[in-house]
Image (cartoon, rainbow, N blue to C red):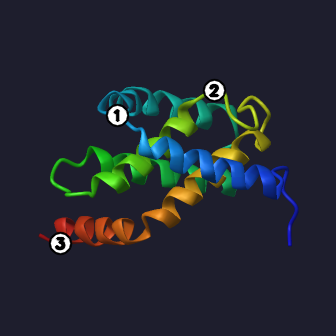
Amino acid sequence: MKETPISAEQQQRLEQELFARAQNVSREDEKVVVEELPEKVAKVLDSVNQRLPLVKNMIAKVKMLYAMIRDKEFAMAWSSKTMVIAGLLYFISPIDLLPDYIPVLGYIDDAFVLSIVMNAIASEIDRYKSYTAEKIVN
């Protein structure tokens, strides 16, 4: 198994904090994500080489999660939406386990949190992918 800069204890704490944060997500938190996420994505892309697989994969996840919460026609369970918002709030936040200013390594905790979100709402993601594919066909 590949060793990461995040210990198992830190991973467990991040997961617990994410689920706790998701239970307290408000409409104001949703507004913060909608307003601040595009700028954060631009900063990440500017600060690291876009060809790095970790960063490209993370940005693709962020963009899809962002699209899911912004799509007014897609009916998403509020519990799933709160997980997405909590994960994106973590991504936006400059204060996290590994500071974002550390090249590449600073985004490992963000990628881990996004993976937790993706796993927690996997069925919603599959449904959204089917929904968007159907919209393209029609």
* Residue lying at 36% horizontally and 56% vertically, measured from the top left: 80
Q: Earlier in the sequence, mark 3 or mark 2?
A: 2
The C terminus appears in which quarter of the rendering? Answer: bottom left
Say the numbered circle drawn on residue 94: 2
Residues marked 1 and 2 touching at CB (< 8 Å): no
Residue of label 3: 137
Which callout, 3 or 1, points to the residue nearer the camera?
A: 1
30 displayed left or right of 3: left
Figure quadrant of residue 98 = top right
136 displayed left or right of 30: left
Residue in the foreground of this view, choosing between 51 and 111: 111
The amino acid pointed to by label 2 is: Pro
Tag 2's secondary structure?
loop
Figure quadrant of residue 49 = top right
The amino acid pointed to by label 3 is: Val
Q: Position of residue 64 (x, y in %)?
A: 41, 54
Tag 1's secondary structure?
loop
Can residue 16 be spotted in the picture? yes
Q: Position of residue 91 (x, y in %)?
A: 56, 39
Q: Is residue 52 above or below residue 98?
A: below
Q: Earlier in the sequence, mark 3 or mark 1?
A: 1
The amino acid pointed to by label 1 is: Ser
Tag 3's secondary structure?
helix
* Residue lying at 54% horizontally and 32% vertically, measured from the top left: 92
Q: Position of residue 56 (x, y in %)?
A: 60, 52
Residue of label 1: 26
Q: How many marks?
A: 3
The N terminus appears in which quarter of the rendering? Answer: bottom right
Q: Is residue 51 above or below residue 128?
A: above
